[in-house]
Image (spheres, helix red, strand yellow):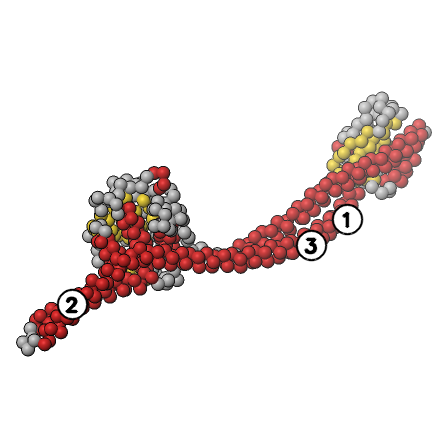
Amino acid sequence: MGAVPVKQKTTSTAVKSTTWWVLLVATITPVVFGIAMFLNSASLAREALTAELESKGKAIVKTLSMQTQQALLRNDSTTVQGLLDEIDRVEDVQYVFVVDDKGETVAHTFVPIFPAEIRTSNVVPNGSAHIQAKRLNYRNSGILDLAAPLMLGVMGEAHVGMNITEGLTPLMERLQRRTAIATIIAILIEAGFLYFTIRHFVNALNHNNVRLRGTIAELETTRSSLIQSSKMSALGEMAGGIAHEINNPLAIIDGTAGILRQVIDNPSIDKAQIKRMATTITDTCQRIGKIVRGLRTFSRESSKDPFEEVAARTIVDDALALCGERLRQRGVTLRTAGILADLTLHCRPSEICQVLLNLLNNAHDAVETQPDRWIGLHATGDSNGVTFSVTDSGSGIVAEIRDKILEPFFTTKAVGKGTGLGLSVTKGIIDSHGGKLWLDIESPNTRFCVWLPRSTTRPTETPTDARTT
């Protein structure tokens, strides 16, 4: 089925990381919102306070200008100073001063001296009857200077400076406290909401993980059953050949035993002949034992077996012990020269034996009706892995079906002859070993190649071949 064992990753670390990130964002968001709300509220408060101070200052400077005009007409500078001192005591008033039409100071409330930069910072145009407002910076404070003309400027100007900063500071402090309280409340509400949301998310994730583990277990069980079914199907196809492969040695043993019985009755026993007969029986029994060993190795359920170090030659011998006779009966020549005895790999031998048998059986079915019938099985290796190749006398696979041959239940065999699972199961086994299966499309004959790593530590590179599909 092409299934690959799924590695289950623990999700606790990812969940914790996500949780912390969500909590961080949830904490920062109300803070940023609170700061933005504070800045916006501060701007609105500053504008409202400025408008209020401007209205208050205009009323004060208007009254001052009227009373100052009367005192100046009487040349009563003492009264003028008294008016300025009285107004200077009004809340939010920073300073008061009066200048004549020549810009000379008539009276002021500055201590100790009148600052020259204030005198000319807000001058009312001649002939204007309107109160003029201008923002200034005086002693690190924001000042709203309000200037009213005296007799249309003929007698000079009266100025009142309203302290914007002093009036704004307590308001800003109250606004900061309220914004901080609102932000903390928002954070607590958001954190509580997120806690329950994340808790629900984690519970749902754990539930899904349990279901996923169950699904993976079912898939592994299905995969194991499928591999076993494929094995039984392969054994069914080879049953006649295996029976013949065992019957022949049994006939040899039976015939040799009959000769031994006759020799024993002969008074002059030929010990050399008896020794040859015993050797024949021993060799024949070993031949049967090899077949039985191959059957036991191949037929057992081995998906959970540990990987072990095994010679490539041993796997090839076990596979050929099961299908060799079938190939010989059908007149298929088998070519297996060149497999080194010391070529080893780390694998589940039974599963790799099944891989080779599936490929050999497919090759047998492909060449069964051809006049020139042969199959080549070879194994080569390097420091990274071992490559098995199964080549038959066929002329390759047509391009139209190359992409489909590894799909489950796809087969080109006649109805009832093939299950369409051989190559799919083969690919699944190879994938579980960290290997690779490909069709060599540049070979003049049909050739399937299998690459497997030599150890359980997977190499960083698998073979790449321009002749693969």
The outermost residue toward the top is 127
Identity of the residue drawn at 28% across and 46% down? 366
Residue assigned mark 2: 255
Using residue 31 as the reference point, say whether residue 267 is left or right of it: left
Q: In which quarter of the image is residue 204?
A: bottom right
Residue assigned mark 1: 174
Label 3 and label 1: CA atoms lie apart by: 21 Å
Q: Is residue 318 above or below residue 129?
A: below
Q: Is disc 2 surrounded by few (<14), some (14 to 19) or many (20+) residues within 10 Å?
A: few
Label 3 and label 2: CA atoms lie apart by: 95 Å
Amino acid at pointer 3: Leu
Horizontal and vertical percent position of residue 253: 18, 68
Q: Earlier in the sequence, mark 2 or mark 1?
A: 1
Using residue 175 as the reference point, say whether residue 261 is left or right of it: left
Label 2 and label 1: CA atoms lie apart by: 115 Å
Amino acid at pointer 2: Gly
Kindly indicate whether the residue at mark 2 contacts the one at mark 3 (C-beta within 8 angstroms): no
Q: What secondary structure is found at the residue carrying circle 3?
A: helix
Q: Nearer the viewer, residue 353 or 308?
A: 353
Kindly indicate whether the residue at mark 1 contacts the one at mark 2 (C-beta within 8 angstroms): no
Identity of the residue drawn at 36% across and 50% down? 416
Q: Is residue 352 above or below residue 33?
A: below
Residue assigned mark 3: 188
Q: Which of 11 and 18 is in front in this view?
A: 11
Identity of the residue drawn at 30% across and 62% down? 295
Viewer-side label of 3, 1: 3
Horizontal and vertical percent position of residue 118: 77, 33
Viewer-side label of 2, 1: 2
- The mark found on residue 233 in the picture is none
Q: Is disc 1 surrounded by few (<14), some (14 to 19) or many (20+) residues within 10 Å?
A: few
